[in-house]
């Protein structure tokens, strides 16, 4: 039994009797990562990740400090996180606002990268489309019009319940699309297949020819998932702050102002009363002397 307990303490640490009581930390300590307490530390998201889409982040000093002083890293950090979630039900600590101020610039930087990718994609398409001759462009427009016509008729037939005819027209439209791509390839235009576009979440450039496997790898990759978490956390924190941040408007000063506005008149009335009493006493003393 003692041997099992020793193995357990070696693995998880002695939680019941810590070696040094001074090492017992509160989540309010300065060197505890407040973003981790809230639920998301960007330093952990992009740790050991390489890519052009990554933000420039230095290692989280708070997490490093906690891990350097705490022998039970995972259980200790998790316990502080759980304790904070319980404590914030009755008190607003402002950690959410601090985390949001850190996250927003990262998202804004990613949005600028997405916009640059869109501009690059538009310039790339415009540059490549100039290589087409007029006859090819006219034929492509004719095919587009025919595809649109067949799609419209297919939708109308589907609404009427004529499913077989609708599927037949859809297959013809798909065949026209394929023929159009082949025609453009022969004409030396590759932008329709090699056209790039940025990912709206992380800003990575994707190609129209990417396979389903390639797209799946991207959407499940660490960079994409990390930026998705940042955006989701930003929305959550914004709503949380609106609902839980205490109203710090200045107190109503109407009463104090009215009291101050009334004080001069009351003081003047008091002074005049004291003056009248003083003058009456002076007259009495003068009459007694006579």
Image: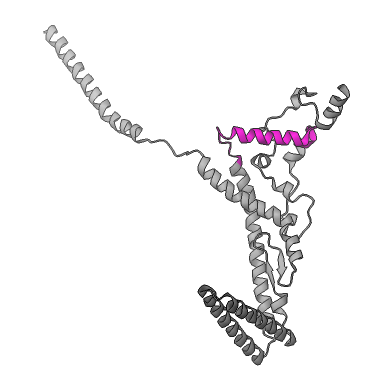
Q: Main secondary structure of the magenta part?
A: helix
Rendered residue at 51%/42% (across/down): 243
Q: Can you give x and y, in whole percent of width and height, for residue 195 in the image? A: 70, 74
Colour theme: one colour
The C terminus sits in image quarter: top left
Q: Residue at x 45, y 39 (%)?
A: 249
Residue at the spot 77% in from the left edge and 36% down from the top edge? 73
Residue 125 magenta-drawn?
A: no
Residue 52 visible in the current orientation:
no
Q: Is residue 69 magenta?
A: yes
Q: Is residue 273 found left or right of 44 in the rendered image?
A: left
Magenta range: 67-95
Can I make out residue 136 in this image?
Answer: yes
Classify residue 14 by image quadrant.
Answer: top right
Placement of 51 over or under 286, stated as above or below: below
Please state which of residues 192 and 23 is positioned toward the viewer in this rendering.
192
In the rendered view of the protein, which quadrant contains the N terminus?
A: top right
Q: Residue furthest bottom?
A: 135
Quarter of the image holding residue 288?
top left
Q: Of 255 and 214, which appears nearest the observer?
A: 214
Q: From this viewpoint, which residue is outermost toward the right?
A: 3
Rendering coords of residue 198 (x, y %): 68, 66
Task: Please identify the quarter of the rendering in which residue 16 is found.
Answer: top right
| Relative height, residue 64 to residue 17 (above, below) | below
């Amino acid at each position: 039994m003692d041997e099992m307990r020793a193995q357990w303490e070696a693995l998880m640490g002695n939680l019941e009797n810590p070696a040094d009581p001074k090492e017992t930390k509160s989540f309010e300590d300065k060197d505890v990562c407040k973003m981790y307490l809230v639920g998301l530390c960007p330093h952990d998201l992009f740790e050991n990740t390489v890519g052009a889409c990554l933000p420039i982040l230095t290692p989280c000093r708070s997490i490093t400090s906690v891990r350097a002083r705490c022998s039970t890293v995972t259980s200790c950090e998790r316990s502080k996180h759980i304790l904070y979630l319980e404590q914030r039900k009755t008190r607003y600590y402002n950690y959410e606002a601090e985390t949001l101020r850190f996250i927003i610039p990262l998202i804004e930087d990613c949005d600028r990268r997405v916009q640059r990718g869109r501009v690059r994609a538009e310039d790339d398409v415009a540059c490549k489309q100039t290589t087409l001759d007029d006859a090819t462009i006219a034929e492509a427009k004719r095919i587009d019009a025919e595809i649109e016509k067949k799609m419209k008729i297919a939708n109308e037939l589907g609404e009427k319940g004529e499913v077989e005819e609708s599927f037949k027209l859809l297959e013809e439209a798909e065949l026209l699309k394929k023929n159009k791509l082949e025609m453009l390839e022969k004409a030396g235009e590759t932008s329709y297949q090699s056209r790039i576009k940025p990912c709206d979440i992380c800003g990575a450039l994707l190609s129209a020819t990417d396979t389903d496997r390639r797209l799946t790898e991207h959407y499940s990759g660490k960079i994409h998932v990390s930026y998705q978490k940042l955006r989701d956390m930003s929305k959550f924190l914004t709503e949380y702050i609106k609902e839980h941040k205490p109203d710090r408007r200045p107190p109503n000063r109407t009463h104090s102002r009215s009291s101050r506005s009334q004080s001069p008149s009351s003081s003047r009335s008091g002074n005049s009363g004291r003056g009248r009493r003083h003058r009456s006493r002076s007259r009495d003393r003068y009459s007694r002397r006579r």
